[in-house]
Amino acid sequence: MSSLLRYEPLAGQFDGLINQLFRPAQRWDAGAPKPIRLDVSETEGAYKVAAELPGVKKDEISVEIDGNEVVISAEVKREKEASENGKYVHSERFYGKTARRFALAHEIDQSRSEAKFADGILELTLPKKIVATATRLAIQ
């Protein structure tokens, strides 16, 4: 007795989709540090950095510059453990400390650097340090 095999390219995929639909909800660790996401652009004289810091207050942000290295750090504090008459059943909001360190190709002029914070975005203007070029002295 010979049996014919049927070609069914979608067999099994439907079951996989149904299993994905009814899988248990993923549990997020709210206390785990979230990375600071940023964009860095460069002009001839400066770097522009835009860093996402949602839920952070201005006084909780620190920016340190050392040569060509920049460190952005922040701390989000949990405001209340729960509402007045209840407790949290689910929480995904981040709280805790986070930091991001990165190096740029040129040293930064710290004295002319600027930082602005609005709507959860930290904007840094980091002017490049002007490198003195060698000069030849005339001998008299």
Image (tube, rainbow, N blue to C red):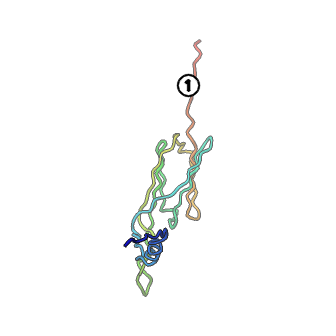
Measuring 50% from the left and 65% from the top, which residue is drawn there? 56
Q: Quadrant of residue 24?
A: bottom left
Which amino acid type corresponds to the residue marked 1 in the rendered image?
Ala
Measuring 43% from the left and 60% from the top, which residue is drawn there? 98
37 or 108, which is in the foreground?
37
User: Label 1, on which residue?
Assistant: 134
Q: Quadrant for the C terminus, please.
A: top right
Q: Quadrant of residue 118?
A: bottom right
- On the image, the x and y values in percent for residue 133 come to 57, 28
- On the image, the x and y values in percent for residue 7 come to 47, 68
Q: Quadrant for the N terminus, please.
A: bottom left
Measuring 53% from the left and 45% from the top, which residue is drawn there? 110
- On the image, the x and y values in percent for residue 43 come to 62, 44
- On the image, the x and y values in percent for residue 54 come to 52, 65
Residue 115 visible in the shown view: no
Q: Residue furthest right?
A: 44
Q: Residue furthest front?
A: 1
127 or 112, which is in the foreground?
127
Answer with left or right where residue 54 lies relative to residue 88.
right
